[in-house]
């Protein structure tokens, strides 16, 4: 499989209680390897492997859509649920 450059977007889609880090449902972040400013490092640590896999072209066989995976924050009181979505970019033309 040829590597295709992708953008990966992380979106908070649900939780059981208000987030201790202040994240709100609907917030989005673009995955760029480093923890985005203000993003909870514990949650980022949990979702990083999923985001990196999508960025590198990988998939998760248990997901119906190969461009989307869901992951949870490790805080059991809050239970943030994140949607991690790959957006494929058009290939760059050769000069």
Image (tube, rainbow, N blue to C red):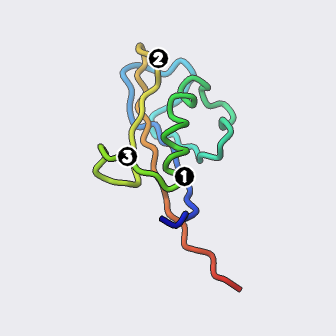
Q: What is the spatial separation of the Cα atoms under label 1 and label 3, in whole angstroms?
A: 12 Å
Sequence order check, earlier mark of 1 and 3 = 1
Question: Is 2 in front, or is 37?
Answer: 2
- Residue drawn where x is 46% and y is 17% of the image: 75
- Residue drawn where x is 46% and y is 36% of the image: 12
- Taking 75 as reference, is 14 above or below it? below
Residue farthest bottom in this picture: 95
Secondary structure category for the residue under label 2: loop
Where does label 3 land, which residue? 60
Residue 29 location, quadrant: top right
Q: What is the spatial separation of the Cα atoms under label 3 and label 2, in whole angstroms?
A: 23 Å
- Residue drawn where x is 41% and y is 13% of the image: 77
Asked whether disc 3 touches disc 2, contact meaning CB atoms under 8 Å apart, the reply is no
- Taking 67 as reference, is 38 above or below it? above
Question: Number of labelled discs?
Answer: 3
**Apparent side of residue 50 relative to residue 5 in the rendered image (left or right):** left
Secondary structure category for the residue under label 3: loop
**Apparent side of residue 62 relative to residue 89 in the rendered image (left or right):** left
Tag shown at residue 55: 1
Tag shown at residue 24: none
Residue 15 position, x and y percent, is 39, 26
Asked whether disc 2 touches disc 1, contact meaning CB atoms under 8 Å apart, the reply is no
Residue 54 position, x and y percent, is 49, 50
Sequence order check, earlier mark of 3 and 2 = 3
Where does label 2 land, which residue? 75
Asked whether disc 1 touches disc 3, contact meaning CB atoms under 8 Å apart, the reply is no
Q: What is the spatial separation of the Cα atoms under label 2 and label 1, in whole angstroms?
A: 25 Å
Question: Is 3 in front, or is 84?
Answer: 3
Residue 72 position, x and y percent, is 42, 29
């Amino acid at each position: 499989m040829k590597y295709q450059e992708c953008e990966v977007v992380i979106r908070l889609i649900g939780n059981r209680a208000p987030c201790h880090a202040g994240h709100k449902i609907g917030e989005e972040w673009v995955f760029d390897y480093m923890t985005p400013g203000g993003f909870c490092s514990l949650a980022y640590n949990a979702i990083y492997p999923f985001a990196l896999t999508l960025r590198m072209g990988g998939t998760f066989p248990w997901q119906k859509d190969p461009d989307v995976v869901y992951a949870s924050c490790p805080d059991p009181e809050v239970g943030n649920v994140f949607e991690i979505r790959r957006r494929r970019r058009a290939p760059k033309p050769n000069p």
